């Protein structure tokens, strides 16, 4: 099975693909708005610490499982099991993660569809077709259905070509574009009136908020979502990494890119809000918090771009193209998790497996669009607040308690001969066994109780 299942052709290819999965709407939209509503730089600080101290070790656990198993998430976990109950546990975690990825894709695809329609809107405005502009930004049922399907079509197009010619090739093209767009937009926004006040709000910490449990819960949730944990995605990406590569540094590099892009997105979005304020737009809610969520991206920022006249259309186009690209590199990873399972479990050709899986996921998206008020929030909560932390924690437990310490070291040593000279191997197996599950369950229970 493993001979022709594909592998990333280069270290750069893996880093772009995994960073592509990690960097998404969570970084460019979620992180800045969470920062804005949680005490500015205090949240950034908590996020940095939790991302490196909790999310990174858990991320490593998923990469190790995948690279050892060299198969889809369920099969990789089963390969590490000896007893019957361990096989059953492996199935629950692996399949649960795959389900989680599919559910996230079902709502993520809808938001990404909106991003695509908002990318087209400035073009129709420039041409002067106002009716089309209104239709594109209405977020009503028909455009939502059309653009979600279009976005899913793009995701399918990439995934059906496999690891090297699909995921890797497109991640290597799209990620540099994303970084370039982000930097150009930051530079432009910094030249506008009000931006420095935004910078101040972003970078001046309100340390009193650091002890609020809500801040820690939000920061860990954000770090988990951002590194795509608990969804089997990093297990499957890990399974495509060559045995010659050093997992410890690869994981650290991806985490660093993910955190840096979130930080850069903050430098764009928060100053942009204060620019909007300088232009007379209301950016604070009645309770005095910065407006976040959909209102920020679909109301305040578009009004800001509109107010900039001709150049505003280009800025809007660049901003929503940035969002769409970020969403696409993440969505391909979400589709790869179930597709790789269907290919290997049912021995189906990749094309067929991609089509069947994505049609199923698209049906859930359609169901959500037709029942927006009741289903959207429910699916988001189920997958991101329950699914991801629980499955992420189980992955740590699986590695820490079911697998052997010597096997972990053996796997990590492939591509990293000097491992035993470093601190990492001494600490990490204990860390993943005790600290990660404890901290994750503490934060999880705090957030749901
Ligand atoms: N990490 C992505 C983001 O920050 O937007 C979201 C994501 C991708 C979540 C892949 C889960 C997943 F499996």
Image (spheres, rainbow, N blue to C red):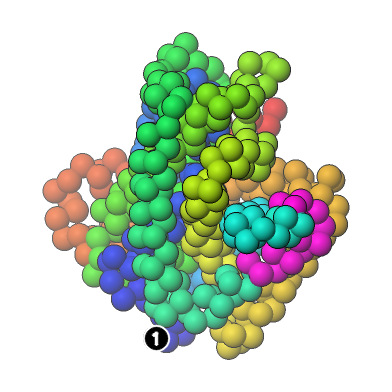
Quadrant where the C terminus lies? top right
Residue count near mark 1 (Cα–Cα under 10 Å), binned few <14, some 14–19, many ≥20 = few
Taking depth in this image into account, of 155 and 89 the one nearest to the observer is 155
Looking at the image, the residue that sits furthest to the top is 208
Q: Position of residue 357 (x, y in %)?
A: 67, 74
Is residue 136 within the magenta segment? yes
Q: Main secondary structure of the magenta part?
A: helix
Left or right of residue 68: residue 147: right
Left or right of residue 386: residue 344: left
- From what the image shows, is residue 204 above or below residue 180? above
**Range shown magenta:** 134-151
Q: What kind of element bears circle 1?
A: helix
Q: Is residue 244 visible?
A: yes
- Give the residue displayed 64% in from the left and 24% down from the top: 282
Residue topped by disc 1:
3
Q: Position of residue 384 (x, y in %)?
A: 63, 45
Q: Position of residue 254 (x, y in %)?
A: 35, 52
């Amino acid at each position: 099975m493993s001979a022709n299942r594909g592998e990333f052709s280069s270290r750069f290819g893996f880093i772009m693909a995994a960073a592509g999965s990690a960097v998404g709407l969570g970084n460019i939209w979620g992180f800045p708005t969470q920062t804005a509503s949680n005490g500015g730089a205090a949240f950034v600080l908590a996020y940095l610490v939790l991302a490196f101290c909790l999310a990174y070790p858990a991320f490593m656990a998923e990469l190790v499982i995948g690279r050892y198993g060299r198969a889809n998430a369920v099969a990789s976990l089963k390969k590490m099991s000896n007893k019957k109950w361990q096989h059953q546990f492996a199935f629950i975690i692996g399949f649960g993660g795959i389900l989680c990825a599919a559910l996230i894709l079902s709502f993520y695809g809808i938001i990404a569809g909106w991003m695509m329609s908002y990318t087209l809107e400035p073009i129709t405005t420039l041409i002067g077709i106002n009716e089309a502009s209104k239709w594109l930004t209405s977020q009503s049922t028909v455009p939502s259905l059309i653009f979600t399907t279009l976005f899913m079509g793009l995701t399918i197009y990439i995934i059906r070509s496999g690891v090297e010619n699909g995921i890797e090739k497109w991640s290597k093209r799209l990620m540099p574009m994303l970084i370039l767009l982000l930097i150009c937009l930051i530079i432009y926004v910094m030249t506008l009136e009000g931006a420095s006040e935004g910078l101040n709000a972003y970078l001046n910490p309100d340390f009193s908020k650091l002890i609020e449990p809500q801040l820690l819960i939000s920061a860990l949730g954000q770090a988990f979502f951002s590194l795509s944990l608990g969804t089997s995605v990093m297990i499957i990406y890990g399974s495509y990494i060559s045995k010659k590569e050093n997992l410890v540094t690869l994981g650290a590099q991806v985490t660093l890119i993910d955190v840096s892009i979130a930080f850069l997105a903050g430098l764009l979005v928060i100053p942009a809000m204060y620019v909007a304020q300088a232009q007379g737009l209301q950016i604070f809610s009645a309770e005095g918090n910065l407006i976040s969520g959909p209102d920020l991206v679909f109301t305040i920022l578009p009004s800001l771009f509109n107010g900039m006249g001709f150049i505003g259309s280009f800025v809007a186009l660049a901003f929503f193209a940035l969002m769409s690209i970020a969403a696409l590199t993440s969505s391909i990873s979400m589709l790869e998790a179930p597709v790789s399972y269907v290919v290997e479990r049912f021995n189906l050709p990749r094309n067929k497996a991609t089509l069947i899986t994505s049609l199923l996921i698209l049906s859930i998206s359609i169901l959500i669009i037709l029942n927006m008020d009741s289903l959207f929030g429910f699916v988001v909560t189920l997958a991101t607040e329950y699914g991801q932390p629980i499955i992420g924690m189980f992955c740590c437990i699986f590695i820490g308690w079911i697998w052997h310490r010597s096997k972990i070291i053996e796997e990590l040593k492939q591509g990293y001969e000097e491992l035993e000279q470093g601190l990492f191997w001494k600490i990490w197996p204990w860390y993943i066994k005790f600290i990660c599950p404890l901290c994750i369950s503490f934060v999880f229970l705090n957030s749901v109780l």
